């Protein structure tokens, strides 16, 4: 191992050790299930904001999105535009009312529990169906994060992908297993800060080295037409970018209001004052992060030339930029190691949140909610930690394929959650006529639509998604929305008690 790799390895070792220490510290502070799953509803503004967004922006932000733009051009930025709009709407319209309603709805600790309490579901149909949806799609989502970690270690250190995958999975599992929600949020805060610094510094330095006057020429030498490559309305070698392509990418923003690992941060904020502070912090963080992630893809193509990343390796563009910049051009590998930890931070900050939300669905919603209603807190914590272990192992098995596409895995999971939960979260907060039957119809129709659209070949051996080019979230979200409205109107109206709870949450009487 050369000196540069030694410094990078040291940075990684210190960073991973710090994450595990945080988990150990918070392990001592979990006295009950509310502490473990929501941190006692005691999150401050900065931690809530950066934790919510860091848990959202997984390895795809620093690997998947820049890689897509590196390969196809700035037309892929419509995903970022859609996500920014979704983030703003989520914080402005969903966060405050969801926090109030989960408290009013019998202090709900999880999203499935909120659905049950919101609609007075005595038969626990919503609790079970939403918990199953969470476990299924978080398996795919967590697998994407673990795959990103494996590719990171493999690319930097040249070690076997599966060994690299194992290292990342063990560390994530360790501090999530020990520390619970506050450990996850604290590490996400650290990781969100590190991600932002890396996102800002690396492309700016690379751009200064390339020079604005040389950018167009280097892009052309790398094999692309600069005019098409830098055009938002163009994508790929053909330069064609259809209306369906734009709608499909913008539709990513619809997913935000259905993401359990993001929504749980809203539920956990200390009070409305802290929540209002979080809004500006989170929106600013997302705007900068998405903008510079796109910038990385463009500048990386010029900065790395004459090296051209092969098909399938585009998602390593940020990694290769850091290695070239700090190992070769600047000769400060320890700084490069710190920025590479920013990529690891993006991966870990999402995987830990997904594991915790999955654990809460199984332990709090299924085990305590259905199987053993009188379960003590220590038993619930034990079940949740076993669940974290089991889901991590299953996600690890899914991620074992080194050719797994980070962007593809994230896309399917994002669509699943956005379609199943997004419409019912919005309508449960803003339309008092929504009832139990409508909620069940919405969750099931959204989830099933995505599974059929993305995984079942129905058109000449192709899935509907591949055949039409339309993102499943567009179809799943609006079909779920329609099912909720139609079924709710065709079945009995909610009781007076449910309507009063709606008004209380709306007016802040909690």
Image (cartoon, rainbow, N blue to C red):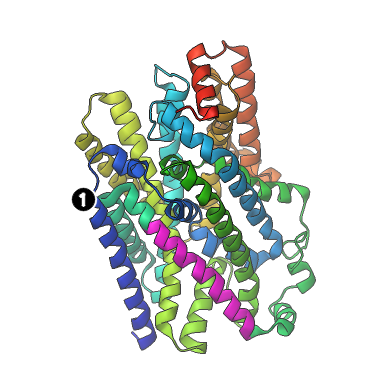
Instruction: State whether residue 174 is above or below residue 394.
Output: below
The image quadrant of residue 34 is top left
Instruction: State whether residue 385 is above or below residue 115.
Output: below
Q: Residue furthest top?
A: 492
**Span of residues in magenta:** 187-209
Residue 361: x and y, percent? 37, 36
According to the picture, the residue beneath numbered tag 1 turns out to be: 28
Residue 323: x and y, percent? 48, 80
94 relative to 393 in the view: left or right? right
Question: Can I make out residue 201 in this image?
Answer: yes
Instruction: State whether residue 382 is above or below residue 198.
Output: above
> Mark 1 packing: few (<14 Cα in 10 Å), some, or many (20+)?
few
Residue in the picture at 41% in, 27% down: 127
The image quadrant of residue 428 is top right
Residue 246: x and y, percent? 72, 51
Residue in the picture at 54% in, 33% down: 425
- Our reading of the magenta stretch's main secondary structure is helix
Residue in the picture at 41% in, 45% down: 139
Residue in the picture at 36% in, 53% down: 184
Front one among 395 and 417: 417
Residue 496: x and y, percent? 51, 12
């Amino acid at each position: 191992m050369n000196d540069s790799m030694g410094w990078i390895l040291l940075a990684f070792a210190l960073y991973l050790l710090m994450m595990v220490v945080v988990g150990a510290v918070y392990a001592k502070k979990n006295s009950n299930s509310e502490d473990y799953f929501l941190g006692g509803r005691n999150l401050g503004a900065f931690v809530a904001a950066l934790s919510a967004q860091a848990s959202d922006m997984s390895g795809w932000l620093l690997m998947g999105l820049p890689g897509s733009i590196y390969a196809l051009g700035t037309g892929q930025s419509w995903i970022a535009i859609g996500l920014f709009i979704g983030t703003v709407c989520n914080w402005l319209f969903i966060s405050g009312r969801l926090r109030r309603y989960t408290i009013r709805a019998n202090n709900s600790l999880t999203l499935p529990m909120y659905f049950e309490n919101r609609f007075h579901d005595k038969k626990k149909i919503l609790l079970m169906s939403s918990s199953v949806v969470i476990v299924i799609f978080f398996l795919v989502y967590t697998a994407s994060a673990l795959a990103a970690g494996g590719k990171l270690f493999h690319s930097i250190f040249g070690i076997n992908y599966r060994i690299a995958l194992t290292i990342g999975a063990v560390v994530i599992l360790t501090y999530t297993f020990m520390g619970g929600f506050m450990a996850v949020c604290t590490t996400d805060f650290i990781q969100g800060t590190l991600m932002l610094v890396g996102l800002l510094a690396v492309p700016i330095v690379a751009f200064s080295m390339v020079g604005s006057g040389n950018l167009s020429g280097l892009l052309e030498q790398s094999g692309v037409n600069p005019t098409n490559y830098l055009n938002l309305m163009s994508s790929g070698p053909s330069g064609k970018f259809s209306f369906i392509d734009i709608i499909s990418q913008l539709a990513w923003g619809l997913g935000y209001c259905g993401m359990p690992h993001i929504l749980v941060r809203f539920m956990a904020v200390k009070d409305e004052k802290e929540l209002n502070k979080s809004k500006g912090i989170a929106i600013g963080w997302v705007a900068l992060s998405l903008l510079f992630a796109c910038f990385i893809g463009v500048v990386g193509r010029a900065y790395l030339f004459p090296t051209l990343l092969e098909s399938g390796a585009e998602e390593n563009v940020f990694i290769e930029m850091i290695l070239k910049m700090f190992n070769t051009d600047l000769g400060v590998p320890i700084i490069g190691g710190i920025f590479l930890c920013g990529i690891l931070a993006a991966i870990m900050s999402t995987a830990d949140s997904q594991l915790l939300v999955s654990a809460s669905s199984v332990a709090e919603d299924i085990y305590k909610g259905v199987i053993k209603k009188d379960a003590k807190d220590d038993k619930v914590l034990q079940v949740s930690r076993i669940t974290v272990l089991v889901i991590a192992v299953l996600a690890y098995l899914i991620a074992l394929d080194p050719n797994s596409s980070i962007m593809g895995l994230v896309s399917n999971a994002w669509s699943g959650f956005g379609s199943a939960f997004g419409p019912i979260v919005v309508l449960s907060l803003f339309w008092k006529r929504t009832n139990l039957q409508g909620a069940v119809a919405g969750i099931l129709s959204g989830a099933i639509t995505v599974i059929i659209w993305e995984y079942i070949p129905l058109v000449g051996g192709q899935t509907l998604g591949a055949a039409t080019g339309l993102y499943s979230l567009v179809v799943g979200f609006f079909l779920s929305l329609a099912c909720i409205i139609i079924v709710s109107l065709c079945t009995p109206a909610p009781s007076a008690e449910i309507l009063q709870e709606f008004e209380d949450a709306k007016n802040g009487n909690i």
